[in-house]
Amino acid sequence: MERLQRVSGRTVLAAALLLLGIAYLAVLPDEPIYHGDTAKFQFVGRSLGTPHTTGYPTYLAINHLFTRFFPWGSLAFKANLLSALFGLAAAALLFRIQSLLGVSALTAGAMTLAAGFCFTFWSQSVVAEVYSLHLLFVCAVLYLFLKWHKCRQPGCFYAGWLVYALSFGNHLTTVTLFPALAYLVLSTDRSLLRRWKTWLALIFFFALGALQYLYIIWRSQDPSAAYLEMRSTSLAVILWFLAGGQFRSLMFAYTPMEFLTGRLPAFFVLWMRETLFLAPLALYGYLRLPCRPAARFLGIYFLCNALYALNYRIDDYWIYLLPNWVLTVLLASQGLERLMKRWPLGRAALAGLTALLCFAIGWNRVQDEVHGHPRSAQARLVYQWLEAVGRHALIISDDYHRSQFAYYYLIGQGWQQQRNIYLMHHFSAPQIRSYLVEGQSFVLPEQRLRIPAGLTVYAVSPVHLQALREAGLQVEQAQAGLHRVYFR
């Protein structure tokens, strides 16, 4: 028993990461499924394009390098694997944060597994999305600032601000960390703010963070860019996007009554479903954390991030709460440490059972969400359509998700050049009629590309089929869900 208690932190961490890695690889898709955004991030980094607002230049740069130079697997597998590596790195930092706060190695390892097996953490670590990198940035900032608070090492202070500034090139919701960082700096050593060297370093770091968005201008001006959803040739437009742009009306869109009676209860339901019984234990850990500034630091971030996510009127706001679930596990490990201080093996066993329970529940949920998602079936149907049309074809898309699945093959896999297949995402019946009757070509907006004449036209949406018939065109079924359009 004493030998078990003396297991080194590195050994425990390596074992935890190995188990997480095996679990992630077991459900990691090797094809474009799950969601349109996922398919987009599987090809847009490799092709050096731009996705939707806010552009995510940091993620795209890393994605491009990894998918280009990693030698094994399909493009989808590589992009998904990159998210898994981000998730594992975030888990490693979570373990280090727990150790920094005095949690024993066995407990920290088991609770790291519990966090990694939570549904949102797990699901976002096996598909090509920006959220596991976002969590990695968050954990890195938390670790560096907590270490600086404990050890007063200037290197940790400046490294923390540098990482924080760079995080804005991936996901702007790290802005919710700023109030917590401001509190920790003021409560730890406010004399740093009276030094001109400190301000000079901060200005330099945030300038580096902002310069990442020159990527958008560069790609917008490059005629060879294969896909541009977000584009800008000026800093003013980029600043408009970064300030919320077209989504600004959705932020803080709820009245106080709607928040109290709708969003807040929904948050507690999500909280319990995501972290099981750990929320009360996390509250106990918060109250018993010996370092009160560190506790307030974590508590302020928890509240700020939750308030932002819950006031954002979008369907997938629950993903924005990922840092809250990780903070819950982090504080729960502290609560478990304090509650069972005299029973280290019992504490580790309980933490291990928690991790096992999270795995058992998370496994089925992640499988159903990723592989069993209705859009995953759509993705496979899109592949069948692309195979059926063969070569020299124009496909009229019916919705965003199917378009992104098609772009994965056309742009990411090079089918557009190899097979002369194009996709029309912004439908216009008059344009199609002019193309078929008069041979008039038109430009595909996302690609700034004029399609060649003489392509066979196909459509998949019943709404589009009706509009095409009303435009005087003929429609006949080529295979299930796919119809050829022609003029006679």
Image (tube, grey):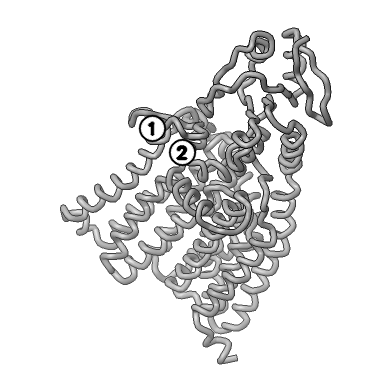
Question: Alpha-carbon neighbours of circle 1 within 10 Å: few (<14), some, or many (≥20)?
Answer: many
Vertical side of 70 occupied by 220: above or below? above
Q: Closest to the observer: 447 or 342? A: 447
Whether residue 141 sits left or right of residue 268 in the image: it is left
Say whether residue 325 is left or right of residue 160. Answer: right
- Pinpoint residue 27: horizontal percent, then vertical percent: 69, 58
**Residue drawn at the location 60% of the way across and 47% of the way down:** 267
Q: Nearer the viewer, residue 341 or 13?
A: 13
Taking the spot 62% from the left edge, 81% from the top edge, the residue there is 346
Percent across and percent down for residue 362 are 69, 59
Please determine whether, in this image, residue 57 is positioned above or below residue 88.
above
Q: Which residue is mark 1?
A: 238
> Mark 2 or 1 closer to N-term?
2
- In the picture, the quarter occupied by the N terminus is bottom right
Name the mark on residue 396: none
The local crowd at label 2, few if under 14, some if 14 to 19, many if 20 or more residues have their Cα within 10 Å, is: many
| Residue 297, above or below 236 | below
Query: Quick one: quadrant of the C terminus?
Result: top right
Q: Amino acid at mark 2?
A: Gly
Dot 2 falls on a residue whose secondary structure is loop
How far across and down, in percent of the image, does residue 453 sit? 62, 19
Mark 2 and mark 1 residues within 8 Å of each other at the beta carbon: yes
- The reply to whether residue 262 is in sight is no
- The kind of residue tagged 1 is Ile
What residue is disc 2 on? Answer: 55
